[in-house]
Amino acid sequence: MLTNRPKTKILVDGGDLDETPDQKLARVCGWPDRTSVDAYPKWQAWMREKQPRLLVIWGKYELSFDPSEPEAYRRDVPKAEVHIVNGGHFALDTAADQIAQLVRSFMK
């Protein structure tokens, strides 16, 4: 779980903020994590309204999120392309070639 990691003190916009390394990575990259669950309904509404082209690549050994979540994207974006790869949270570590091919195909 993301919140079980040790906290580090960092300076953000002139103020101190305690956060785990995973939370910092999620914040810097703009990724949702378990601390941003309150924002999920807003993102889901945006996806339902805008129907963006959506590629979901998920590691089948992902432990931070529920295994049903990759398919849940199709509730909001029925044409979403969902792929489960042999990996965990950082699937690029174990499935880089497969992921690169999926992204290349999606971008055509």
Image: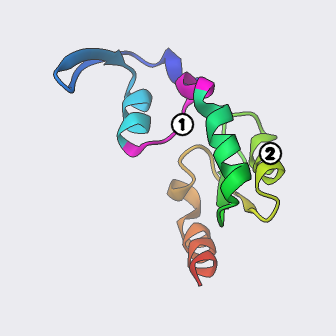
Q: Residue at x 49, y 41 (%)?
A: 31
Instruction: Report crowding for label 1: few under 14, some 14 to 19, many 20 or more residues within 10 A (C-alpha).
Output: some
Residue 40 spot, x, y in % from top left: 64, 33
Q: Quadrant of residue 64?
A: top right
Q: Which residue is drawn at 83% across and 49% down?
A: 75
Please give the label number shown on residue 22.
none
| Residue type at numbered disc 1 | Pro
Q: Is mark 2 on a helix, strand or loop?
A: helix
Residue 99 spot, x, y in % from top left: 59, 67
Q: Residue at x 59, y 85 (%)?
A: 108
Considering the whole magenta stretch, tell me its main secondary structure.
helix
Residue 18 spot, x, y in % from top left: 33, 14
| Residue type at numbered disc 2 | Ala
Q: In which quarter of the image is the N terminus?
A: top right
Residue located beneath label 2 in the image: 72
On screen, residue 5 versus residue 36, left or right, reads left
Q: Does the magenta stretch include residue 77?
A: no
Task: Give the magenta range.
Answer: 29-38
Residue 27 spot, x, y in % from top left: 39, 35
Q: State how far apart marks 1 and 2 are (Cα).
A: 15 Å
Q: Residue at x 35, y 40 (%)?
A: 28
In the depicted view, which residue is nearer to us: 7 or 76? 76
On screen, residue 49 versus residue 30, left or right, reads right
The disc, 1 or 2, on the residue closer to the chain's N-terminal end is 1
In the depicted view, which residue is nearer to us: 72 or 95? 72
